[in-house]
Amino acid sequence: MRVKWTVADDVWNLTFLLDPEDEITGNCSDGAALELRTNSCQIRLPKGATNGANVHPDLLAVAAWTVVAPWTRQKVTFDRPISPALAEVFRTHWNVDAGPVGGDPRSGTRLGISYSGGADSMAAADMFPDAPFIHFQRISHPRVPNRWSFYRSDVLAGLAQETARETGREVTTVQSDLEFLLRLPRPGYPEHHAVTVGALLLADELDLGGIALGYELGSRWLGGDRYTHRYSPDNPMWSADGKWGRLMSAVGLPMVLPVGGLSEPVTMRIAMESDLAPYVRWCLRGDRSGPCQKCAKCLRKELILAAVERRPLRTALSADSTPARKWQEPPPYGGQETIEYGCAHVPGIEHTPFAKAAAHLQATEESTRWLEHCYAPAIAEIPERWRKQVDAYIADKVGLMTEDEVRRVETWGTR
Amino acid sequence: MMRFVRVLVPVPARRAVRSRLDARYVTRAGLRESVEKSRADLRKTREDLRKTREDLRQTQEELRASVQEGKGASQEIRKLGQEFKAERKKDAAHLQDMTNGLRQLEALVQEVTALRAEVRQLRQLKTAVTKAGEAAATGHQLALQTAEALDHVLQNEARVWQAVDGLTERTAATDQ
Ligand SMILES: [Zn+2]
């Protein structure tokens, strides 16, 4: 794989050329099969955000890698030399020959937050009141007709800007069409880490020394949504020592998962209690007036919210509606722990689209209590610079899991 | 009281006598006759009176009956009059009703006409919409196919560049 960056007026263009052994098919680090559509994309930073082309080559290399990794088989050639430390991680953790090699590694001090506006990243943001937000906004690709216009990235970006205005938070919105590089299964990040391209390109400018992401207990430790239903300490995407963890650390931007030990019900509670709560939005379809209330994501989040508020489910969706179809099948489900919690805590669950799932899962308040506490190894994984702050916050607002509860995490999917 | 003796006397004699007698007794006989006559007259008069009274009574009764009848008749007439008035009133109301009904009918007819026109328009519109829908569906289908085709063009472009690059590299290697 050969990678080339060009920049003009804070718009960074990435073009890549496949080496003979490369393919337009590949796999995401989570194992999902992907197919490439085209070989160029752009990343638009706010005007005057950077001092021209003065972005550290390591940052550019990793930003490109989030897009080209699935198609690269053996070798990646960047258009400027990367630090030996970074090349070493490519070799040891990716089995990829990366070069050219030369120059010094970079470092920074501040923690940036990759902020989507959803409950998880909002909870992470609540732990770090002074951290700047970097928001990724999908834009159309000039070579790809946008057949997914129901995805209202403009609404999410608008909310991020509103958050900045109303709360005084530092918010930078970075626009990119890189999701349209994926032909299959649908437009999206070729690697989950592509969401950090803005933070990577702005890291020098913002003096970033770490990037916080809203991945919670399920995504980090329980195999997550698209991933296998199992305890996953070795998660290739999010573990500090995994191939992505090491790569991000090598460019002075280690990943920080402030809510990595917390379940979705807990991040939801934190988000709703936070001063950012008025700006929370997980629905990708709703307009400025609010979430659509009829997509699968809205339904799932409503279950969590109702469980946290210990109230009946409010939804117009019926069991035979498309968004509810998944819950008519027997488990396992992606993010099943959250569904168990919801079924155990929502009064009258037997009259909701989750009735069948609830009957299968047989979850109780007792059997889901572990989800109300923090899995301590998640705190241990946080870079030391920010660990104390997370530790204190969690001790104050959540509390740690007992040994029995820890066992629930570590035996997840085996019984 | 005095007693009169009857004597058989031949008629002419008797007459003569009687006339003499009558002449002698003219006053008494005439009076008697006059009285008799008066009595008869009286009797007759009485009878007349009685008859007249009877007539009067009858007439009165008849009159009364007539009056009664007249009263009944007038009541009936009044009643008929009232009925007539009521009828007339009713008829007026009826007429009003009918007028109103007619107006409503006219309005309805207009409405139906308008609705018919609308239905006709809608039918035309439906045809247009169906045609537009078919066109849109075809357009959508074409857009999808075009996008799919473009995807393949883009993918081929990436592959072509890949091949060109490989060729360049091999050529460079042979040149050395
Ligand atoms: Zn929605």
Image (cartoon, rainbow, N blue to C red):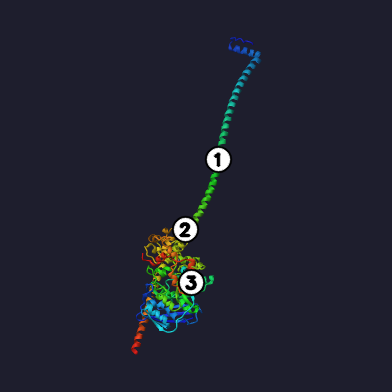
Residue beneath label 2, please? B112
Asked which secondary structure carries label 3, the reply is helix
Q: Is residue A1 above or below residue A335?
A: below
Q: Which is nearer the eye, B2 or B84?
A: B84
| Residue at the farthest front position | A403
Q: Residue at x 40, y 84 (%)?
A: A100
Q: Amino acid at mark 1?
A: Lys
Q: What is the chain letter for disc 2?
A: B
Q: Secondary structure at mark 1?
A: helix
**How far apart are labels 2 and 1 at the CA level?**
47 Å
Q: Nearer the viewer, mark 2 or mark 1?
A: 2
Which x, y percent locates residue B66? 56, 33
Looking at the image, which residue is at 56% across and 42% down? Answer: B82
Report helix, strand or loop for mark 2.
Answer: helix
Residue A144 visible in the shown view: no
Residue ID for mark 1: B79
B31 up-or-down from A299: above or below: above
On the image, the x and y values in percent for residue A206 come to: 50, 77
Taking depth in this image into account, of A355 and A221 the one nearest to the observer is: A221
Q: Residues within 10 Å of mark 1 (few under 14, many from 20)?
A: few
Question: Do badges 2 and 3 share one subunit?
Answer: no
- Amino acid type assigned to the residue bearing label 3 in the image: Lys
Residue A380: percent from the left, percent from the top? 44, 71
Snapshot quadrant of residue A95? bottom left
User: For mark 3, what is the residue?
Assistant: A388
